Image: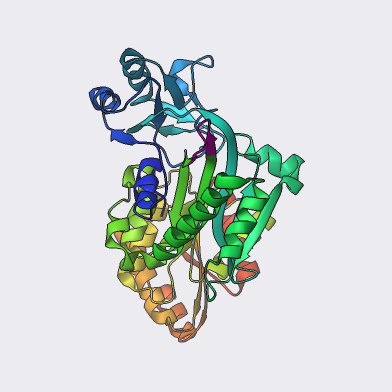
Amino acid sequence: MNIHEYQAKEVLAKFGVAIPKGFAALSVEDAVKAAEQLPGPLYVVKAQIHAGGRGKGKFKELGPDAKGGVRLSKTLDDVRTNAGEMLGNTLVTIQTGEAGKQVNRLYVTDGADIAKEYYLSMLVDRASGRIAMVVSTEGGMDIEAVAHDTPEKIQTITIDPAEGFQPHHGRAVAFALKLKGDLNKQAAKVAEQLYNAFLATDMAMLEVNPLVETTDGQLLVLDAKVSFDSNSLYRHPDILALRDETEEDPAEVEASKYDLAYIKLDGDIGCMVNGAGLAMATMDIIKLNGMFPANFLDVGGGANKEKVTAAFKIILQDPNVKGILVNIFGGIMKCDVIAEGIVAAAKEVNLSVPLVVRLEGTNVQLGKEIMANSGLPIVPADDLGDAAKKIVAEVKKAA
């Protein structure tokens, strides 16, 4: 689960992390009132969307010469103008794609006199089973270019969660950032604070870009991007309350209500599969046969009629779907239960696109009989390769 920058900073502040003062705003007047509570004379107005690259982004409605989604404002009138241009308009960044995201809220913060920008992020390194802290002296908007052109300027420090954050980890971060004196101590301290926040709230990723050194010798977290492990949210109702569903695809929000893992893609064949690995293989083999998957959808190991029906409805919300491929391996899940769900769902949604179903596992023969006797034009498949060929052929035939 992703959250906005201002929410991320509020979370980090609880762990003592130094951040500039700022306030969220849902309207132009809110933005002006927020600026009035800041010392000034420089204010920063930031668009709040779940995507990076806001500073270099462009608003669809304002033309190519307009400023991006992070703007410096020297007066309250500037704050009003910038807020008015951002709210309600669509910001396109390198991470949003051409569709962009509508800006529904802003973050107005106090300006900072920046002497140097650094980069610091944390994530779970599955290869080592440790938490990786990634740091660089080259923070700012071009960190992707740094990673591509000069990867030697990025260093990784791993922390064993059984050992926890130790003083030598803090010294390693400060050394990697080439900081000395009091800044060295500050870097070690902020690294430990970020680690504590990461661990305590079950973050999946924490990115501070930039971590800045001010002209008066202070380290501040100027921007923060945070995502949480969705499987841990039951432990953190306060974090779950930060979820902004307007930033998510409506179909993905609906899928989450039924505990379905759904991600919309750009293809034309809808997929309903149980198990993430099998779902990836299904998408690959569809592409191998010359077409593209319209979604990733994992119904999980405990699917029932309600889940299957919901899955069908979600798949068919996408107008690009021209056919559906169901690929189920019944281990814990019984194939006859899935077959009953498929038949019920197809009737309820008045299915009008080709449907190919491949079942294997527990009670597979009974499941095939249920579909054969349903009176519906369900095309059975013997294996995954057969299923992919049949759905592609059915879609082309129906075109």
- Number of marks in picture: 0
Task: Let me know if residue 282 appears in the view.
Answer: no
Task: Let me know if residue 93 appears in the view.
Answer: yes
**Where is residue 168 shown, x and y percent of the image?**
61, 64
- Residue 337 in which image quadrant: bottom left
Extreme residue toward the front, this view: 181
**Where is residue 109 shown, x and y percent of the image?**
37, 31
User: Which image quarter is the N terminus in?
Assistant: bottom left
Look at the image and say whether residue 250 sits in the magenta stretch: no
Relative to 97, say whether 275 is above or below: below
Relative to 329, say whether 50 is above or below: above
Residue at x 64%, y 47% (from the top left corner): 177
**Where is residue 329 shown, x and y percent of the image?**
51, 77
Residue at x 59%, y 75% (from the top left corner): 382
Residue range in magenta is: 212-219
**Where is residue 344 shown, x and y percent of the image?**
32, 67
Relative to 171, say whether 334 is above or below: below
- Foreground pick, 337 / 229: 229
- Residue 139 in which image quadrant: top right
Relative to 172, say whether 222 is above or below: above
- Foreground pick, 336 / 163: 163
Look at the image and say whether residue 218 sits in the magenta stretch: yes
User: Which image quarter is the C terminus in?
Assistant: top right
Coloring basis for residues: rainbow
- Residue 307 in which image quadrant: bottom left
